[in-house]
Amino acid sequence: MKQRSALDMYANGTAWWDTSISDIKKNEIIIRGYPVEELIGNISYTQMLYLLLCGEILSEKKAKLLESVLVAGADHGPRAPSIAAARMAATCGISFNSCVATGINVLGDVHGGAVEQAMRLFYSTESLLDAHPEQSVSSVVKKQFERFQREGKKLPGFGHQLHDHDPRVKRLYELAQQLVKEGEIQGCYLMIAEEYRLQLERWKQKNITMNIDGVAAAIQCELSIPAEAAKGIFALSRGMGIVAHAFEELQNGVLIKGPCPNRDDLVHYSGPLKRHLEKK
């Protein structure tokens, strides 16, 4: 994105805020050209999200598929740092919205960023396929996979610390494949994701499954969602779980629950031995 000074833009006659998303006037709210009263009760939350983000209204079937991605990522228990952080914050007596914000703010490139990374990979792979139509999906993916190996990068969207057969992945893949059969989506990104899984499987010489980030990335690519929006969408998804867990912890009434129990074996001190200031 080109960086420009806001003051320079304003001096050139540009409005201070320029948006194509909404037009708000007295007694009138227009969202992407639609009167809000026409949207209320007629489109779903997911359709509204896509309209705000991408400017168009998804078909009901596509919207239901995107909604399935939001549902699948909503919660993964206190094992997930974002959930744990929100619950810990709730024990510190801060406001409920601050507890939720604490959980959301943990999401980033490491925890919650794999979908964006996988989407960038899938989009770039599709661009290579478009530029080289004479090459097969397998050959293009193989070259990209080998590049990842040379650069020592981890392939995003595959593998999980806990699950080796994540129940969310199978269900999302089934729903997406059904829309491919019905002609709602093309399925090219699902195919690319599957080819990367096969390449990784051959390299590791063991069964490898796609994780929730990989299938969510492929589905969002099928819907032409920008990769840069992925972490924001995941925040909306995981935000549901964060809200529920923070609220539950508030109801428990527990105060000051730290990151781990007060046990010596869980916190190790590796600093200098006990010492004292020299006497003057």
Image (spheres, rainbow, N blue to C red):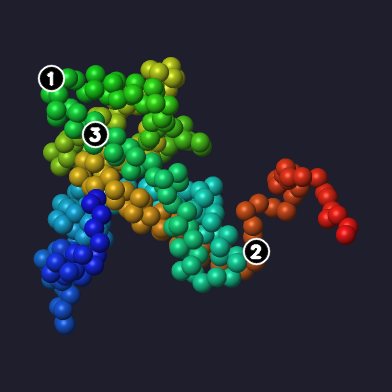
Amino acid found under the numbered disc labelled 3: Ser
Q: Is residue 117 left or right of residue 10?
A: right
Q: Which residue is mark 2?
A: 256
Q: CA distance from mark 3 to mark 1?
A: 17 Å
Residue for point 45% across, 44% down? 110
- Foreground mark, 2 or 3? 3
Task: Name the spot of residue 257 as percent of width and height, x first.
Answer: 64, 60
Q: Classify 10 Å Cα crowding around label 1: few (below 14), some (14-19), many (20 and above).
A: few
Q: How many marks?
A: 3
Whether residue 247 is visible: yes
Give the percent coordinates (x, y) of residue 167.
41, 39
Task: Please tell me which residue is depicted at 23% across the width and 47% down the height of the picture.
Answer: 225
Label for residue 124? 3
**In which image quadrant can residue 115 be found?**
top left
Which residue reaches farthest bottom?
26
Q: Secondary structure at mark 2?
A: loop
Mark 1 sits on what residue?
Answer: 134
Q: Secondary structure at mark 3?
A: helix
Q: Residue at x 28, y 45 (%)?
A: 227
Query: What secondary structure is marked by label 1?
Result: loop
Residue 32, above or below 263: below
| Image side of residue 263 versus residue 245, left or right | right
